[in-house]
Image (spheres, grey):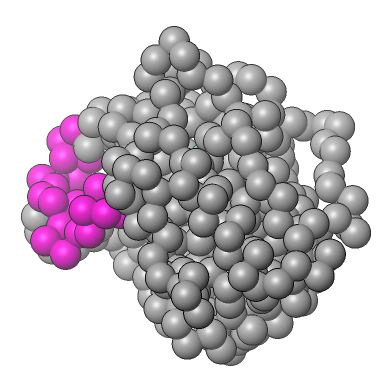
Amino acid sequence: MAQDGPLLDTFGRSHDNLRVSVTDRCNIRCFYCMPEHPVEFVPRGEILSFEEIERFVRISVRLGIRKVRVTGGEPLVRKGLPELIRILSAINEIEDLSLTTNGILLEDLAEPLYQAGLRRINIHLDTLDRERFRQITRRDELDRVLAGVEACRRLGYSPIKINVVAVKDLVEPDLVPLARFGREKGLEIRYIEFMPLDAQGLWQRDKVLFAGEILERLSREIGPLRPAEDGDPLRPAAEYVFADGIGRVGFIRSVSDPFCRNCNRIRLTADGKLRYCLFALEETDVKGLLRSGASDEEIIGVIRSTVRAKWEGHEINTARFVPPPRPMYAIGG
Ligand code: SAM
Ligand code: SF4
C-alpha cells in the first residue's frame, strides 16, 4: 500500500479525474472529429474489456481518482455499456461518474444506464436545425438526439449538459436558440472552442468561435450573465448564470484561455493507452501490462511515471504547437 496517495506531476498538479474511452467507433461523422470515410477503427480484440477497465479504475482510485467520465468514440455503441456503468457505480471511491454521448441511442439506453447508477450526462448537440445538424455530422439524426435529451429529462438525470462545439462561420445562428432551449428545458449549455483534434487537419485558429464573442452575444440577445457562485475554479468550464435566474451556460476556452495550469485529468484510450493530456504526443501502453500479468504495484508505477512526465501544457497558441497523432474520436473526448 506504500504506493497509494495522490497522483502528482512535477508542476504540483494533483490528478483526480479520469476519462475512460470505451470505443473509437461512432454512429455519426462530425467533421471536426472524424473523417467521413474511410475510418480505420481499432480491431475489437485490441479494445479493453470491461474487466480490464474495472481493474485499471480500481487501481486509479487508490491514487486519488474520484471523478470518472466514460466517453469514446460514441460510448453507447459499445455493447453492454450499462453493465460497465453498473461496475463503475459500485466503486465507492468514485464520487462523480458521468458519460459523454452524442445522444443518438439514448432514447433506449437512458433508462438502463440510469438503473445502472448513472446520473450525470453530457449530450453533444451543436444545433437545433436539422440541415445544419446533417452538415456537421454527415448524418440525419437530430430527432433521435432530441428524443434522447427528453428521455434523460424524464428520468431525472441531473445535471444534463449539452456540449456545443463552437466553430466560426457555422454555429453562430445556433448560439441563442440553444441557450434558450437550455433555459426552457433546464439544461446547461456548454460552448467548447473548436480544438485542433479533427482527423482531416481542418482546424485553423480563425475557425474558432471564441467564448468571449459567445458570451457577449448571449448577454445582448437574451439577457445579462454573471459568473456562477458555485462555479468550480478547477473545472475547465467557466460557468455563468443568467441574471434573471433562469438558465446556466458554460464556456470551455481551450484555445483562448487554456486550463492547463489547473489540469487534473488523465485519459485511458479504448485500446488501453494512458495519456496525460488530450494533446499529448506520447502515450503509455497499459493494455500490455494488463494482459501480461503485471501486478497492481507495477501498474501504479507506470501510472505515476506517466503523470510525472506530464508537460506544463499544450502550446496551441504558439508556433511550436504540434497536433496529436490521434484525432478526438480515437483519444476519447
Ligand atoms: N461521441 C461522444 C460525443 O460526441 O459527445 C463522446 C466523444 S466526443 C469525442 C466528446 C466531445 O468532444 C463531444 O461532445 C464534442 O463536444 C467534443 N469535440 C469533438 N471534437 C472536437 C473538437 N475538434 N474541438 C472541440 N471539441 C470537440
Ligand atoms: Fe462521434 Fe462524438 Fe466524434 Fe461526433 S464528436 S464523430 S459524435 S465521437
Q: Which residues are magenta?
A: 216-241
- Locate residue 278, reporting x and y percent: 53, 41
Q: Where 298 sits versus 62, above or below? A: above
Report the residue at 58% width, 77% height from top: 58
The residue under the point 16% across, 40% down is 219
Q: Is residue 138 above or below residue 97?
A: above
Q: Is residue 112 above or below residue 40?
A: below
| Total numbered circles | 0
Q: Is residue 207 left or right of residue 288?
A: left
Residue 303, horizontal then vertical, whole percent: 57, 57
- Residue 330 covered by magenta stretch: no
Based on the displayed image, in which of its 4 quarters is residue 105 positioned? bottom right
| Res. 107 visible in picture | no
Q: Position of residue 131 (x, y in %)?
A: 60, 37
82 or 177, nearer to the observer: 82
Residue drawn at x 72%, y 50% as measured from the top left: 285
Among the 4 quarters of the image, the one containing residue 166: top left
Q: Residue furthest front?
A: 2
Q: Nearer the viewer, residue 86 or 287?
A: 287
Residue lying at 15% horizontally and 36% vertically, measured from the top left: 220
Is 204 left, or right, of 294 in this rendering? left
Q: Is residue 184 left or right of residue 284?
A: left
